[in-house]
Image (spheres, rainbow, N blue to C red):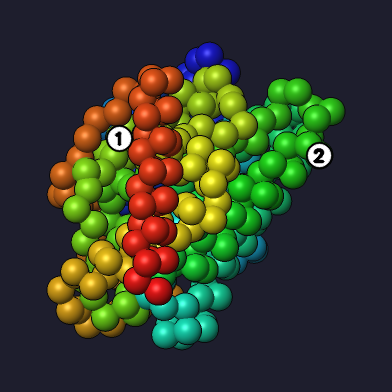
Amino acid sequence: MPSLQNAVTVITGASSGIGKASALAFARAGARLVLAARRAEPLEETARECRQLGAEAIAVVTDVTDEVAVQALAQAAIEAHGRIDVWFNNVGTGVVGPYWEALLDLQKRVVETNLMGTLHGAHAVLPHFLRERRGVLVNMVSMGGWSPTPFAATYAASKYGIRGFSASLRQELTGYPDIHVCGVFPALVDTPGLAHGANFSGRAIDPPGPFLTPEHVAEVVVGLVRRPRAEVAVGLPATAARIAYGIAPVLTERGVGAAMRAALRRARPDTRSEGAVARTVPTGTGTRSGKPVWHVRGPSLGGVALGGLGLLVGAELLAGVLTRRG
């Protein structure tokens, strides 16, 4: 799909963060947009901004955990434009803290939102792709789909699940060379997402960064639709995590675990919060939250190798410290 002019594009989670940035990026490329999220007013604001850029855009309030609502979203796109060319499963949330500390209902909600939301989207759009024998399905994963995410175990479970689902689905669609299933694996991104997640750690979740910009991730998604690939890392840390866990999983697990424990120990105390996991909140309607960002133009092979090696060495050193202290 070298040109996105008039490409009918459905984006979930479009009221803020990467979803909003992606909507604006696709609007600039000339796509016709069908935007979805739980919050009506921020969603309509995104649609309005897309229309100001000259794109057609409609807003459909949708909770992706509701399969009927997601089917209705697909039907709204068909009724408005007669087809669907691109579907971006972008919604994501998480619970931070020891797994056993958070309410199980919230942990279930993470799986329902991240994993089941992705399954609902795929189930809604694939019949239309199969009828036309073409289409691009983009699933938002994260570098947490390649390596462990201690103190966000359910988030990691959902992201591992999305990666496995995407890989399996690609094989089921081998008879349809023009239907593509793509996974996006970004490193930390400056969005309202951290504030929207639940926090049961008792500590403020405020990673020092630097972060990717949601606009950069959005441009990667647009490029991926133009030239589909199975999996794409966004940011050197994501590529490094993939390499490190593939080569030395035990060392990487220990290193990431030690780093997370140290970060939580250093963080200031904070109250526990359910965030926006179970219900919407009015805050966080922009693309960014204001954290320090870096602009990535794509890592070189040497940079990838050095990043992976650095992560491995760091993991090994941390593992050695833990062993000596044990």
Whether residue 325 is situated above or below residue 305 in the rendered picture: below
Q: Which amino acid type corresponds to the residue marked 2 in the rendered image? A: Glu
| Residue in front for this viewpoint, 117 or 312 | 312
Q: Position of residue 255 (x, y in %)?
A: 40, 56
Q: Amino acid at mark 1?
A: Glu
Whether residue 44 appears in this view of the structure is no
Q: Residues within 10 Å of mark 2 (few under 14, many from 20)?
A: few
Residue sitting at x 56%, y 67%: 111
Which residue matches tag 2?
A: 172
Q: For residue 182, which quarter of the picture?
A: top right
Q: Position of residue 128 (x, y in %)?
A: 72, 38
The reply to whether residue 233 is in sight is yes
Identify the residue shown where x is 68% and y is 50%.
Answer: 165
Q: Please name the residue shown 61% across and 48% down the image.
A: 163
In the orientation shown, which residue stands out farthest toward the front? 324
Residue 201 at x, y percent in the picture:
32, 77
| Residue indicated by mark 1 | 215
| Between 1 and 313, the one nearer to me in the picture | 313
- Residue at 39%, 21% in the rendered image: 302
Which label number is shown at residue 28? none
Q: Position of residue 39 (x, y in %)?
A: 36, 62
Residue 100 lies, with reference to residue 245, above or below; the image says below
Residue 262 drawn above or below residue 180: below
Number of other residues with Cα within 10 Å of mark 1, as a class: few under 14, some 14 to 19, many 20 or more:
many
